[in-house]
Image (tube, rainbow, N blue to C red):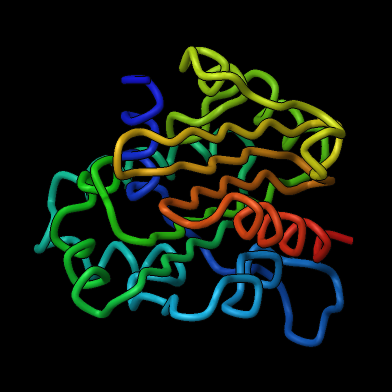
């Protein structure tokens, strides 16, 4: 379980680079795939931290230098593995909780409020995305890292997210976690949903995956 919480904390160090290419394209991008407010239960609001990597890094550079350093290093490593873009989304149940994330990214593992953290990585091709899912650790997340958490997981078609997918769900005291990692075409997605009904969390994941066409 300690491994899982450490990985969840690293979610806040994953950042996004907006879609590359001209406007008007109908092909999916990291930004178009990422979780939307309509995928989520009412009462959850998008945080200002959401957006592309440059915006995110600029916002946390002075407020949370430790997260800034790990985020910069992590993004550089992901690019070496073939990532060409990504998108990050944060949703919580209050403006105060959103603001707290700006200065202390490591608090995610102990959050008792409703929180959604989503990262969509776009790779140069499907082979690179499959490698990212099966063998690489993208910002501390991989199928192997979830299996190592010693918490029961669901894999493959039973998740509703495709063959290359894994979902972990667990409730601990006053916290609940739904963590899904999956690969579809040239995308790898990480979705962490805390303290939200599991059925609603799964619904959001399925909706997000449906935008990868």
Q: Residue lying furthest front in this view? A: 173
Q: Decide: is 182 above or below 108.
A: above
Q: 32 or 143, which is in the foreground?
A: 143
Question: Which quadrant of the rendered structure holds the C terminus?
Answer: bottom right
Figure label count: 0
Q: Position of residue 113 (x, y in %)?
A: 30, 59
Q: Decide: is 139 above or below 201.
A: above
Q: Decide: is 70 above or below 193.
A: above
Q: Residue lying furthest bottom in this view? A: 24
Task: Report the residue at 77% width, 38% height from top.
Answer: 159
Q: Position of residue 94 (x, y in %)?
A: 28, 77
Q: Position of residue 6 (x, y in %)?
A: 32, 29
Task: Report the residue at 31% width, 39% height from top.
Answer: 9
Say whether residue 181 is left or right of residue 171: right
Task: Report the residue at 82% width, 44% height from top.
Answer: 160
Q: 43 or 16, which is in the foreground?
A: 43
Question: Which quadrant of the rendered structure holds the N terminus?
Answer: top left
Task: Report the residue at 44% width, 80% height from top.
Answer: 43
Q: Position of residue 127 (x, y in %)?
A: 81, 32
């Amino acid at each position: 379980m300690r491994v899982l919480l450490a990985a969840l904390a690293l979610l806040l160090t994953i950042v996004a680079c907006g879609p590359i290419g001209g406007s008007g394209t109908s092909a999916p991008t990291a930004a178009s795939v990422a979780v939307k407010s309509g995928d989520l239960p009412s009462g959850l609001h998008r945080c200002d931290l959401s957006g592309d990597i440059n915006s995110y890094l600029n916002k946390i550079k002075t407020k949370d230098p430790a997260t800034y350093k790990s985020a910069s290093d992590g993004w550089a490593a992901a690019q070496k593995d073939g990532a060409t873009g990504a998108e990050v989304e944060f949703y919580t149940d209050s403006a105060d909780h959103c603001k707290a994330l700006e200065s202390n990214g490591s608090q995610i593992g102990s959050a008792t409020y409703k929180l959604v953290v989503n990262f969509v990585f776009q790779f140069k091709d499907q082979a690179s995305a499959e490698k990212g899912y099966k063998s690489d650790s993208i910002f501390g997340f991989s199928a192997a890292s979830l299996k190592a958490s010693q918490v029961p997981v669901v894999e493959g078609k039973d998740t509703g997210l495709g063959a290359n997918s894994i979902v972990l769900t667990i409730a601990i005291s006053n916290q609940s976690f739904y963590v899904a990692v999956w690969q579809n075409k040239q995308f790898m997605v990480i979705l962490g949903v805390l303290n939200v009904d599991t059925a609603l969390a799964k619904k959001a994941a399925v909706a997000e995956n449906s935008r990868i066409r």
